[in-house]
Amino acid sequence: MTRPYLGNPKYTIEVLQKYDFVFQKRFGQNFLIDTHVLDKIIEASQITKDDFVLEIGPGIGTMTQYLAEAAREVVAVEIDNSLIPILQDTLKDWDNVTVINDDILKVDICKLAREKNEGKPVKVVANLPYYITTPIIMGLFEKQVPLSSITIMVQKEVADRMQVGPGTKDYGALSLAVQYYSKPEIIANVPPNCFMPRPKVGSAVIRLEKYEKPPVEVADEKLMFQIIRASFNQRRKTLVNGLKNAQDLDYSKEEIESVLEKTGIPVNIRGEALTLEQFAEITNAFKYIR
């Protein structure tokens, strides 16, 4: 079988020139051209020959070649139809890869897991465009997709947000959501010169290992995330005011203060100071006030 070769910038340039490929800014395309980083991603994702892997945004197939070597089967979902002929060319030597030309946010991944992996947890690997990182990650978690892990390249700032705790400026709704569903670990920081074209900011590879059971017990997941979002929508306001002003919540100031008193949380606290455990406690208390 042919060895993966696209990690070498020489071959990347050859392929792009052969097809007169034009980078689409609206898709946030930055192709990896560093074999050391590719090796780190494959190692971090802990893929074996038993695994079914979903790759989001394969580009010209650089990481796909590495994934195909390591996994039993790979499905790569690419939104840009101008890349499909290139992928057919660069992946022709691997018979365990299927390319789907679609928007990942519209793909039924649960159905894919049933058809390709008997419904067992899949491993997701991706070099994600910065503009769509959060919707993709939240979509994977909230739609209850059977997941083992997500290993992704994202903007460094986004990777930092995923793993920080309360009281920091990067802490927010994304941090809490990621930490509710998974254990995040930054694997490597990746400078702009590892990509073509070079992005303006640094990137990082982060691995999200999906929890079998979330680390906190909450009576109503949907309500908890409504409370979390409301508390960060107006970061400078107290939690009481943030929740009182939220359009999708219907609690009076008195009810909110009563819940905080019951849970031993100061009424003048801001959302950014609360832990995931405290958000779960507040949610459980709200669930039973009426």
Image (cartoon, rainbow, N blue to C red):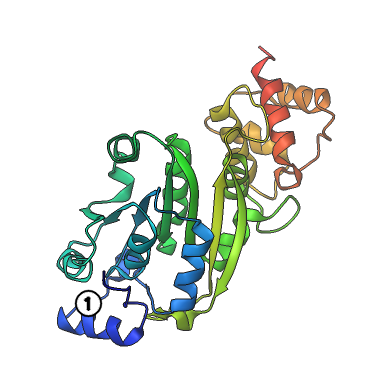
Q: Is residue 84 above or below residue 272?
A: below
Q: Give coordinates of residue 100: x percent, y percent.
A: 22, 52
Instruction: Please give the name of the residue rendered at 42% of the width and 43% of the height, measured from the top-left corner.
Output: 139
Check disc 1: other Cα within 10 Å, few if <14, some if 14-19, many if 20+.
Answer: few
In the rendered view of the protein, which quadrant contains the N terminus? Answer: bottom left
Depth check: 186 or 157 in front? 186
Q: Is residue 8 left or right of residue 273?
A: left
Image location of residue 109, percent across then percent down? 33, 40
Q: Nearer the viewer, residue 212 or 57?
A: 212
Front position in the image: 116 or 19: 116
Q: Count the marks: how many?
A: 1
Tell me if residue 4 can be seen: yes
The relative height of residue 237 versus residue 56 in the rendered view (above or below) is above
Position of 199 relative to 57 (above/below): below
Residue identifier under label 1: 22
Q: Secondary structure at mark 1?
A: loop
Q: Residue furthest bottom?
A: 10
Residue at image point 61% right, 31% down: 224
Image quadrant holding the C terminus, namely: top right
Residue furthest front in the image: 1
Residue furthest top in the image: 290
Horizontal side, residue 92 vs residue 181: left or right: left
Q: Amino acid at mark 1?
A: Val
- Report the side of 52 relative to 142 (left or right): left
Q: Position of residue 245 (x, y in %)?
A: 61, 35
In this view of the protein, can residue 249 be seen by the observer? Answer: no
- The quadrant holding residue 176 is top right
| Image point (32%, 67%), residue name | 65
Query: Is residue 16 placed above or below 45 in the rendered structure?
Result: below
Residue 206: image location, x then y, percent: 55, 60
Closer-to-camera residue (290/75): 75
